[in-house]
Image (cartoon, rainbow, N blue to C red):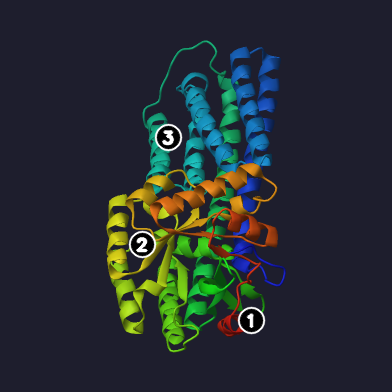
Amino acid sequence: MDAPIDNAQAVGWPGMMDRRRRRRAFYLLLATGLIMLLLGLGWATFFAWRGAWPIVAVELAIALLGLVVIVMARLHRPRAASWVAFAGLSMLLCFFSTFLDVSTDAVPRTSHVFLLVLALCAHHVFRDERPWLRYGMVVVLLVLFAVFAGAPIRLPYSFAIAEDVRRVGIWVNLATAMASFLVVLRLAETDVAEHRALHRALRDALSQRRFMLLYQPQVDARGRIIGAEALLRWHDARRGLIRPADFMQAAEDTGFILPLGQWVLNEACRQLAAWQSQPALRRLRLSVNVSALQLRQPDFVQQVDDAVTRSGIDAGLLTLELTESVLVHDMDDAVAKMRALHAMGVRLSLDDFGAGYSSLSYLRELPFAEMKIDRAFTRGIVRDAQAATITRNLLQLGRDLGIDVIAEGIEHEDQFALLGEQGCRLFQGYLFGRPMDVDAFKQRIASTP
């Protein structure tokens, strides 16, 4: 797992694009909430003047819903705000179209057209959700629109909106719906254009060899380097080194993580082969991160086998770091592949141990040779007695299971000393070296007593 970026590293434009995307979503939520608030209060005032109190109650509900969306967006809870906005608006629109905006021979219903806008918004806003959830919501909204448009519901309720008001409301509704539709369509087009530009940039960077691996030392209790973690960087001529946090999500979204991950695997094996020809380096282990998408490839085990065989390395020197996310989809397939990798001699490491919820069952049932204690615990170990207790228990768990335990994020001597007293024997962090190129890494080893 990569360490926090230091000041010498540049933040890349992929990360800037991702922030722009989140900022657009934030402003879209604020705008949606504000429109609901203003329209609800405006119409509530109008219908209160006419004495239509049931309609006033519905309009105030819309205004209140808009206020809730604004507050949740300001509290940096965009996902929850999106769900509240869509669920609330869908129910209110259905209620409004059924009981208040009732079709007559003279004036048709128009409030249901906002269901089309909601369907487009759902396709855009929930693009990061699971496909069945995203498209299921779109289908439900389109079906509701078709029901109200194709089978007009006429319920003779006395509190339905008067026809003279609805004649004006037709044009207000249609104009608002058209404007909202165009705004969301424009946002979607912008995201698609940025998505394509980023995919093209990543593809060009790989073909022009602008990706590189840096190596962060992993040491034993005496400070001797026993291996390293290979950390990916994108070297841009104008922006410097771009860390994975600023482009990896985009690589996964575009599917580029597959060729990029294969390049990392091949490069790591090539580096291990180069070290094996040097006596001082031949027993070093090298860890590489593997994404869930990579592991789900049908031929992933064969890719690893080909890389190991082609490079001629000892498979036991290669460690594949996995997070619990790799087991979320099709666990049986992931387990079968992990056992096949273990049979080849490749070491498996559970990264960020303690950050999830089911790690104990994974460690008991799967062939992990190593687990890494998340820096969220090691960072506060000196000042936080609870964090110290957690690391002590995790170290004991590793001893009971017979697997190695690496403490990540070690930056200070007091952290190193306390973990050593608890029985930790493997460490990684800035205290022992920042991520460095291969030449600096070799010099670091040469200077170690």
> In which quadrant of the rendered view does residue 374 lie?
bottom right
Observer-side mark, 2 or 1, equals 2
Instruction: Please name whichever residue, 250 or 365, is drawn nearer the observer in this view of the structure.
Output: 365
- The Cα–Cα distance between marks 3 and 2, rounded to whole angstroms, is 41 Å
In the image, which disc is placed on residue 237? 1
Observer-side mark, 3 or 2, equals 2
Residue at horizontal 35 percent and vertical 74 percent from the top:
315
Task: Name the secondary structure under disc 3.
Answer: helix
Q: Hey, what amino acid is under mark 3? A: Phe
x and y percentages locating residue 155 in the rendered image: 43, 15
x and y percentages locating residue 75 in the rendered image: 67, 39
Task: Name the secondary structure under disc 1.
Answer: loop
Q: Which residue is mark 2?
A: 295
Q: Which mark sits nearer the N-terminus, 3 or 2? A: 3
Residue at horizontal 44 percent and vertical 67 percent from the top:
257
Q: Quadrant of the C terminus?
A: bottom right
Instruction: Please name whichever residue, 61 or 293, is drawn nearer the observer in this view of the structure.
Output: 293
Q: Which residue is mark 3?
A: 145
Q: Is residue 328 visible?
A: no
